Image (spheres, rainbow, N blue to C red):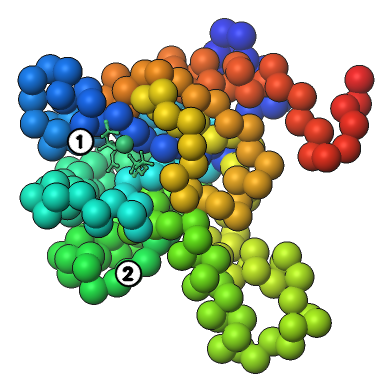
Amino acid sequence: MDVPGIDNDRIPAHIAVVMDGNGRWAQRRGLKRTEGHAAGEEALMDTVDGALDLGARWLTVYAFSTENWRRPVDEVRFLMGFNESLLMRRRDELDAKDVRIRFIGRRDWRVPRRLLRRIDESVEQTRRNRTLTLTIAFNYGGRAEIVDAVRRIVDEGIPAAKIDERTIAKRLYAPDMPEPELLVRTSGEYRLSNYLMWEAAYSELVFTDVLWPDFRREHLFEAVREYQARDRRFGGLSDE
Ligand code: IPE
Ligand code: IPE
Ligand code: MG
């Protein structure tokens, strides 16, 4: 679909998003932090629709970091249950839109088995879909991902002299996923917080003050316009 001000020939194939600011959104309304997380569901669904409108092929969202276990137990428990119920509520709808659901992150003992089951079911149900791959980063940490890749390399007995960037890239959680051209973070925080540390090496970073529950596809379009105005040099010199 044509979006005003956006060049269809330069749509980022992969957009990564740090969905941040749920707690502040709730606090400003005198609500509990968890109500901010709940309100983020609409933002996520509209962002998926926006990515579909644009024709982006990959959308990766940060839902729970390896550091988020530091939060109060009640909030962590809420987030586990919320993500489980969100998958149950939304997977048929996403499936109908030809969205392939995938996950990156550590499946450790702290993630409730019920949530893991819901994840596996959603991935299985949608695995043949091709229009958009929605990757949910859950119990995800960029450093943990690199550590896990290194462990596999050692387990496989690969000699040091044979290790290059491809050796590592092939052992990340989603080796077939292209690197994000665009990474968006909401809520006015200017950091990566351990998101896609390897993959985002050359991503264009766009920051917005909008809090995640208020984020809608028009904000995504605005981020893509900003992306399209950038000069990506990859260490070289620009074409112009
Ligand atoms: C992002 O919103 C959601 C998660 C980290 C799970 P926050 O909960 O971090 O909201 P703020 O940053 O405290 O406002
Ligand atoms: C990053 O947000 C993680 C997610 C959005 C899931 P945080 O709110 O956890 O990051 P910090 O603590 O502000 O760096
Ligand atoms: Mg935050």
Label 2 crowd (10 A; few <14 / some 14-19 / many >=20)? some
- 187 relative position to 230: left or right: left
Rendering quadrant holding ligand 3: top left
- 20 relative position to 3: left or right: left
- SS under mark 2: loop
Q: Which residue is mark 1?
A: 37
* Residue 10 x, y percent position in the rendering: 69, 26
| Amino acid identity at mark 1 | His
Tell me the residue at 60%/55% (across/down): 198
Q: Please name whichever residue, 61 or 50, is drawn nearer the observer in this view of the structure.
A: 61
The answer to which quarter of the image holds residue 121 is: bottom left
Name above or below for residue 175 compared with residue 77.
Answer: below
Q: Which mark is residue 99?
A: none
Distance of label 2 from label 1 (alpha carbons): 22 Å
Tell me the residue at 73%/65% (across/down): 165
Q: Residue 39: in sight, yes or no?
A: no
| Outermost top residue | 4
Tell me the residue at 56%/52% (across/down): 197
Q: Please name whichever residue, 116 or 36, is drawn nearer the observer in this view of the structure.
A: 36
Sequence-first disc among 2 and 1: 1
Tell me the residue at 30%/29% (across/down): 21
- 98 relative position to 37: left or right: right
Name the quarter where the C terminus is drawn.
Answer: top right
- 158 relative position to 94: left or right: right
* Residue 34 x, y percent position in the rendering: 13, 37
* Residue 44 x, y percent position in the rendering: 32, 33
Q: Residue 153: in sight, yes or no?
A: yes
- Quick check: is the Cβ at mark 1 less than 8 Å away from ligand 1? yes
Q: Which mark is residue 107?
A: 2
- Quick check: is the Cβ at mark 2 less than 8 Å away from ligand 2? no
The answer to which quarter of the image holds residue 33 is: top left
